[in-house]
Image: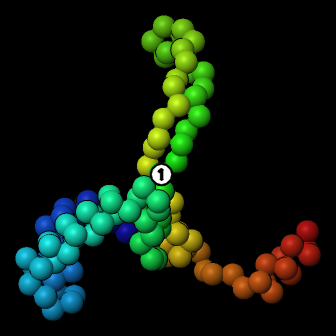
Amino acid sequence: MAASKKMSKSAIATTLAEKTDIAKKQAVAFLDELAALAYKEAKNSFTLPGLGKLVLVNRKARMGRNPATGETIKIPAKKVVKFRVAKACKDAILGNAPKTKKAAKKKGAKK
């Protein structure tokens, strides 16, 4: 399988426009609105069905080490945005077939 390069916003808009029979301008506007909505709603959590969820996480203060000097430093608490990938997305990308509950029970019983 040949390695593919990253898709630009323009390439994504072109592909969306072709697949949905809309103008490229409309596809670009859709992507812009989706991004704006995600930024606004990520304060709670923003789910993109089939892809994942943007969530705001409070990180605790912790001790770290300066890699240049080896000196121990205190890293303050802060808020960070994380993207949690949906199981369906992982399975589609990694090629894992969805397992049924029955198959999972059988596999666990054999061990």
State which quarter of the image contains the N terminus.
bottom left
The part of the image, by quadrant, that contains residue 64 is top right
- Kindly identify the residue that appears in the image at 22 percent across and 69 percent down: 33
Display coloring: rainbow
State which quarter of the image contains the C terminus.
bottom right
Expressed as whole percent of the image width and height from the top left, the position of residue 23 reads 8, 84
Looking at the image, residue 34 lies above or below residue 26 = above
Expressed as whole percent of the image width and height from the top left, the position of residue 104 reads 79, 78
Q: Determine whether, in the image, residue 8 is placed left or right of residue 64.
A: left
- Residue carrying label 1: 56
Q: Determine whether, in the image, residue 43 is placed left or right of residue 23.
A: right
- Kindly identify the residue that appears in the image at 45 percent across and 12 percent down: 68
**Residue 95 visible in the displayed image:** no
Closest to the observer: 5 or 88? Answer: 88
User: Label 1 sits on what residue type?
Assistant: Leu
Looking at the image, residue 69 lies above or below residue 101 = above
- Kindly identify the residue that appears in the image at 55 percent across and 18 percent down: 74
- Kindly identify the residue that appears in the image at 41 percent across and 58 percent down: 42
Give the total number of marks visible in the rendering.
Answer: 1
Q: Determine whether, in the image, residue 90 is placed left or right of residue 42.
A: right
Q: Determine whether, in the image, residue 6 is placed left or right of residue 60.
A: left
Q: Looking at this view, name the residue that lies furthest to the bottom.
A: 21
Expressed as whole percent of the image width and height from the top left, the position of residue 95 reads 53, 74
The part of the image, by quadrant, that contains residue 102 is bottom right
Q: Residues within 10 Å of mark 1 (few under 14, many from 20)?
A: some
Dot 1 falls on a residue whose secondary structure is strand
**Residue 26 visible in the displayed image:** yes
The part of the image, by quadrant, that contains residue 101 is bottom right
Expressed as whole percent of the image width and height from the top left, the position of residue 110 reads 91, 74
